[in-house]
Image (cartoon, helix red, strand yellow):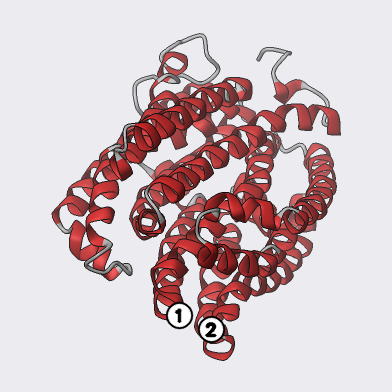
Amino acid sequence: MDENLIYNKPITAANMLAFAIPTTVRMVFISLYTTVDGIVVSNYVGSMGLSAINIVYPVLNVNMALAFMFAMGSNALIGKMLGEERRTEANRFMTLTVLLNVALVMVIMTLFFTWDESIYMMLGSDEALLPYCVEYGTIMVAVGPIWTLQILFQGYLVTADKPGMGLWLSVLGGVLNVILDVVLVGVLDMGLTGAGLASGAGMFVGGILPLFVFFNKKSLLHFEKPARPGMDVLRALGNGTSEMVSSLSSAVTTAMFNLQMMSLAGEKGVAAISALFYLQFLFVTIFIGFTSGIAPVVSYNYGANNRENIKKLFNIAVRVIAIASAVMFLLAELLDRPMTMIFASNDPVLAELMISGFKILALSILLCGVNIFASGYFTALNNGRVSALISFLRTFAFEVGALILLPALMGIDGVWWTLPCAELLSAVISVSLLIKYRKVYGY
């Protein structure tokens, strides 16, 4: 294997940050242009458009759940295969994963198009919001296969030791998305249709251009004759369960947040929680990006049974997560008003809802890093069970429980406190599991 590849370099903070930063920046950039989507829609279409996007979001999360399950689960297995010097098997398995995931997404597309209006009404829409949901959802569901490829290829480019390419493709797609948002929604007044087309164009860059890498036989990872479906597929799906659980849980909890806010504050409440989720995700992506960035190196060293490197990686990651958590929390608290006003500069009622909510919601940023890292780290170590347990408790069990209990006791403030409470309980579990399995994996 090429000596210049990351897998053959010493495990130092400098090397790991150099490898992980492109993935981290890429994730932040992706969240930035999704946030710009929300800003443009909020200011040009209004709170109805922003509410509709959040109601459609759980539908899109089903596609994302499958893609993340295949991407993270297969990526960990592929990294392990590379560590075991099984390159041909890694390439054939990657090819199979792509084909299976795209086929499943196309089946789901058909189901959504058949019952789209009924689904949106169940997720919190009313008759006034329904046309907006159908307008935006039709386009976003239609580009599902390309979106799936984008998610898969983001991970595979990192494993192929091309994180920089993944970054620049994300930048290119993001810039295209933002430009088209402004032109189609702001200038041409195409509403949510324009927003959907802009997002689809950005996804095209990240989902189609990497094909040139994976059809190149000189690439560390490339397409070959697909492997036959077998136990490796089941292992990958099991290992990626935590990411699927996280996305599906997000679909359920987003719908529950929408229903709670619709009952407590109407359509503006749904718009407020939509905007705050954009802002929170902007901070959370730093932890997701860093964890995804170092995951292939963890998997490779696990496959090579190099415990010394695994321990070094863990110690570096813990320091990075701790520092980033403190910095991100302080930034969120200091910039709460200017960030929220970008979404609601022309709507004082919406602005007041968002400012009061973000002061509380920002507490979750201080705690989520350890949970995201713990889940991703166990996935990289091919321990899907523990990873899935953390994800299930964090994104579903604790969140749903808090979302049912706290609003009943505290009203709207209870909605805002839901995520900080869920992250705190999850952090206790995550730290306990990291301590429990420390000797098993040698970190």
Q: Earlier in the sequence, mark 2 or mark 1?
A: 1
Position of 67 compared to 242: left or right?
left
x, y percent for residue 273:
51, 64
Is any atom of residue 443 visible in this view?
A: no
Position of 322 compared to 299: left or right?
right
**Would you identify the image quadrant in which residue 358 lies?**
bottom right
Position of 189 compared to 186: left or right?
left
Quadrant occupied by the N terminus: top right
Looking at the rendered structure, the kind of residue marked 1 is: Leu
Looking at the rendered structure, the kind of residue marked 2 is: Pro
> Which residue, given by chain and number where applicable, does mark 1 sit on?
264
Q: What separation in Å lies between label 2 and label 1 (alpha carbons)?
A: 9 Å
Q: Dot 2: within a 10 Å radius of its alpha carbon, few (fewer than 14), some, or many (20 or more) residues?
A: some
Q: Secondary structure at mark 2?
A: helix
Q: Nearer the viewer, residue 317 or 262?
A: 262
| Residue 11, label in figure | none
* Contact check, label 2 and label 1, Cβ < 8 Å: yes
Q: Secondary structure at mark 1?
A: helix
The structure residue drawn at horizontal position 50% and vertical position 76%, both measured from the top left corner, is 400
x, y percent for residue 411:
54, 84
> Which residue, given by chain and number where applicable, does mark 2 sit on?
407
**Would you identify the image quadrant in which residue 416 lies?**
bottom right
The structure residue drawn at horizontal position 36% and vertical position 60%, both measured from the top left corner, is 55
The structure residue drawn at horizontal position 77% and vertical position 41%, both measured from the top left corner, is 310
